[in-house]
Amino acid sequence: MTFRSEYRSCLAADLGPDQAGRRVRLAGWVARVRDLGGISFFDLRDGSGLVQVVVDPAEVPESSGLRMEFCVAVEGTLRPRPEGTENPDMETGALEVAADRLEVLSRSASLPFMIDDRSDADEQVRLRHRYLDLRRPRMAANLRARSRCIRAIRQTLDGLGFLDVETPTLVNSTPEGARDFLVPSRIRQGHFYALPQSPQLFKQMLMMAGVERYYQIARCYRDEDTRADRQVEFTQLDLEGSFWGRDEVFAAVEQAAAAVVKSLRGADLPLPLPRLTYQEAMARYGTDKPDLRFGMEIADLGEVFAGTGFRGFAGVLEAGGVVRGINIGARHLSRADLDGLVDRAKALGAAGLVWAVVQEGGGLRSPVAKFFSEAETDRLIRSLDASPGEVLLVVADREETASHVLGALRLEMGCPDGHDELRFTWVVDFPMFDRTEQGGLTPSHHPFTAPVSIDQMRERPAEAAAQAYDLVLNGSELGSGSVRIHDSDIQRAVFGILGISGEEAESRFGWFLEALRYGTPPHAGFAIGIDRLVAILQNESSIREVIPFPKTQSGADPLTTAPTRVAADQLRDLGIDLTAETRISLGEGSGGIGTPGKA
Amino acid sequence: MTFRSEYRSCLAADLGPDQAGRRVRLAGWVARVRDLGGISFFDLRDGSGLVQVVVDPAEVPESSGLRMEFCVAVEGTLRPRPEGTENPDMETGALEVAADRLEVLSRSASLPFMIDDRSDADEQVRLRHRYLDLRRPRMAANLRARSRCIRAIRQTLDGLGFLDVETPTLVNSTPEGARDFLVPSRIRQGHFYALPQSPQLFKQMLMMAGVERYYQIARCYRDEDTRADRQVEFTQLDLEGSFWGRDEVFAAVEQAAAAVVKSLRGADLPLPLPRLTYQEAMARYGTDKPDLRFGMEIADLGEVFAGTGFRGFAGVLEAGGVVRGINIGARHLSRADLDGLVDRAKALGAAGLVWAVVQEGGGLRSPVAKFFSEAETDRLIRSLDASPGEVLLVVADREETASHVLGALRLEMGCPDGHDELRFTWVVDFPMFDRTEQGGLTPSHHPFTAPVSIDQMRERPAEAAAQAYDLVLNGSELGSGSVRIHDSDIQRAVFGILGISGEEAESRFGWFLEALRYGTPPHAGFAIGIDRLVAILQNESSIREVIPFPKTQSGADPLTTAPTRVAADQLRDLGIDLTAETRISLGEGSGGIGTPGKA
């Protein structure tokens, strides 16, 4: 047992009531200390748990002046606590250690916050003292859960014959969405590595290399503008298989997900996981990451209001728009609440929102009820499966807007707090391309994704479906993947549709197009964000709670103060210098070429 | 079984002689193809092995024009090979698949080198086509061995209760030996992250956080000048324990090492591993990483030649130098060979080298034999345990030089080829500090290492021993570690001895000194280089053979061409620019501030 050492003979968790009289040596931290009639009582916390220690400073002078979070080693005799003083909330609550020796291994300064889960210290303060924050039971449990999650994944994939392969992290710029972090090379001045946004091209090369089943718990990097709950570095399970289609990817990922749920929640995840097409998800939930823990599905009301006399709807339908609605259930909403929903819908981009409350005995209470025919009212109530007292929200707008607005309102009205229930779903058949603001096409997943139909892609690329899929849990995208292109001609065709010229493709991806030419097997893969997965399973609202040393939204580490300024000569060794603008903004004066900054 | 898919019903390795008549679908690569009387025979290689396929292009037109490394799927009937055509060197050599369907999944261009272990392609060519190089059996075996090595380590440490914790890789500059790679921050222009040379301070903070047993398979970075067989990024097993001393570190590392040896070599590593002090290692082997697979130990000959009349030795001994020698065994060396050894010793830094060949019936053949008394000759022969015909090499010089030269000659004369035998050893009690060329002190390990004696360190720092230790295998340093300082006052004292002022310590390590103040437990740890470990166990002479996608000595990747030039506006987004000198050397003209380079 590696926990034993010269400092200790056992851990708190090893102590049982049958061991009274045993001599023990323990080491850990002083959690809660109190003096009763000159005798010190404290809970000793070690990596396994807590045990009460009783010590008399008159006999053991080292024990006087003990304070919270002192690190101590004690030696003494285990004994039952006096009757009536047992603590049933503590594993070792029937016992105490009567210490006759105590050594303060190191003292603690005053704590910036209490080491317990009730502490509500500011996150900046917690991050600046992360080594204390991680002593709190909840955070310690999150660290352990993260480790168990990754272990469950490894055991599953190892058992399925996958090979864990490490791909490089000093790479060249990749063509994915976000910006690359760049790393200047000292040996080749003026040249830069990039940190990988994912191991995408390397894992595809592993397939070319005949590694038929690959996985990696991979560190990835994304230099994105500040966005809610993202990190500049993050961890993903990355996997890929040769001679694979979508079903084989799903089977492997599902087994890994089930192992993680079993390990962290003790629950059996029913497999296979449900599948929704992208089109279905958008129509029924207004999003490509639907939260299936509650219904409140979006219904298309086009038929309900076909030929309606209500001009608000008729005009939209004639213009090719849609009328859609959700039933948010029986709620007591004041007129002000309902007006608030209208404002919210407008803030989300809708031209307006129609609300209607189903009345006892049929009929609607709504500002527009008078414009609906009786048949329309009945069909509306039936379409939304509505009962008296229930509130219906209807949006008439362009399809995209109606979908987005109702999807958002659905979540705001229905989304449960926390993540006690887990609802996974696949979303499949994503579009191959998205429109850019400039009217061009951009890959919806990434440019190495295979189309469902090559002919369709060539003829009507904007409508083509991709062999791309996401895994969604409780409304969060956990990961995404695709069947890849394994033919360099098709790869070139995709580059062409993306407006990447042959010459540019050659200069950016020539080495990869070359690699595709040597008998590349059909292959497919996936990647899952570990941070998000663990956060949801641990019922944490931020991924920062499950990352040992996270950075803030701006990419700073309040603990070590990274990123920091560096000496100008260090930069010049790399063949780079700060721009004049940067030097001025750092208060270093403008300088000229050849004038090192005073960093 | 995730290897099954629409492309295949089984793998080559699944096929046994009892399955003749079975219909099978297989997918893989065409390895060796030959036409006999119009019929094609080829070996199909998949992730599990090889099987021969027979196909008649007249019946299966898709099979005409098959070439090496085409990726194919076949369907057919398993049957015994005709008598006399079995191949006993192949697992499936008694069988063949008579294919009646074949699909070329993708074609292959002409190969730059053959996909077999006999290929001796230039390493640049191999790296440029690494996806083909990794198809070679030896390289595929190396990939699998690396994965198994890491798995064995994980299983061992998981079993011992260690927690796998991920530490950040966008950190601030660390005070270790080599240079940091820097990563410019876009959000905080003029500020830089560093890539970690090791997770040293983070793992110490995990100890402060109460994670009593930590490990990580960690990616680390080192921007060193080109040195033999190093990589700019590398992987290490990093571990640390609280309430630990050296013995607990050794026990954990030894169990991990034994698991790896068992997994890769099938052998039981006898534990505990031997321990040598640094002083002993230097005296007996002339190096702090002794190769124990052979004897040829260095003997001190000071007593042999005490009061000698041979002025060459007497002068050195009087000046405080040493006379030391090794017995390189019975060898037939010509006078030219022996002169070559003298030249080699000089090239290694010695003033000279005395050789002597032991004669039948006693006495020496040596240019200096006549200067030795009979007693000196006898004592020399006895001290080096020498028999007639054996060759003795003696160096009289400063202790450091004699040790270094004899250590190097010992290796050149005695080191076995390859690594069939494995000899591990610990080297302990390294010095606390080394002298810098400027006469100051620099940490021998790193500045967080605890001294053996604090008093000795304060009084005679240059002679103080550290609680630092290395693990050595067959003459290579596999890793190193130490008991850490867990007291901020001692940490400050070490900074003081290193000439780091209180102010500088505060500005560089203030956050760490602060962290030490909250009940830091005693702790100790270790790190092992995975690349070197796997290379030795796989009998490879370079770590590049066990790294999936290695870089060259200059840090370049011949496959992806990283590092590359990037657009000037990308740099300006980061607040940096190339220096004028760099732009000129890249042929971009000098430009002025505000003139983007033409990258």
Image: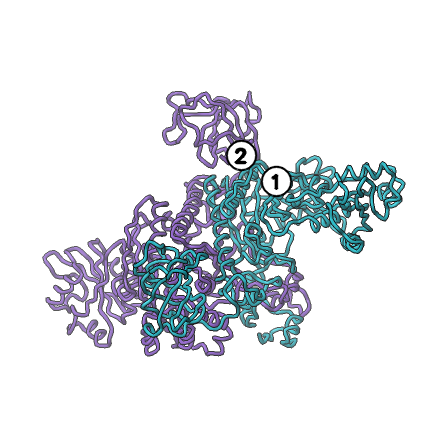
Chain colours: A purple, B cyan
Residue B92 in sight: yes
Picture coordinates of residue A394, whole percent (x, y): 22, 65
Q: Which residue was labeled with disc 2?
A: A70
Above or below A409: residue B106: below
Measured as percent of width and height from the top left, residue A572 is found at 65, 64
Which SS class for mark 2? loop
Q: Mark 1 lies on which chain?
A: B
Q: Position of residue A320 (x, y in %)?
A: 24, 75
Q: What residue type is labelled 1?
A: Ile
Q: Quadrant of residue B51?
A: bottom left
Within 10 Å of disc 1 (Cα), the crowding (few <14, some 14-19, many 20+) is many
Q: Residues within 10 Å of mark 2 (few under 14, many from 20)?
A: many
Tell me the number on the disc at residue B485. 1
Residue drawn at x 61%, y 57% is B230
Camera-nearest residue between B106 and A113: B106
Report the quarter where the C terminus of chain A lies: bottom right
Q: Position of residue B88 (x, y in %)?
A: 44, 56
Same chain for labels 1 and 2? Say yes or no. no
Compared with residue B70, is residue A266 higher up or lower down, i.e. above or below?
A: above
Q: Residue B452 or B317: which is nearer the viewer?
A: B317
Task: Please give the chain letter of the residue carrying mark 2.
Answer: A
In the image, farthest residue toward the front:
B84
Mark 2: amino acid: Phe
Q: Which residue is drawn at 45% across and 40% down?
A: B159
- Is residue A228 visible from the viewing direction of this image? no
For the residues carrying marks 1 and 2, which lies nearer the camera in this image? 1
Q: Residue at coordinates 43% horizontally, 22% vertically from top-left?
A: A20
Q: Is residue A569 left or right of residue B4?
A: right
Determine the residue positioned at 33% across, 79% down. A459
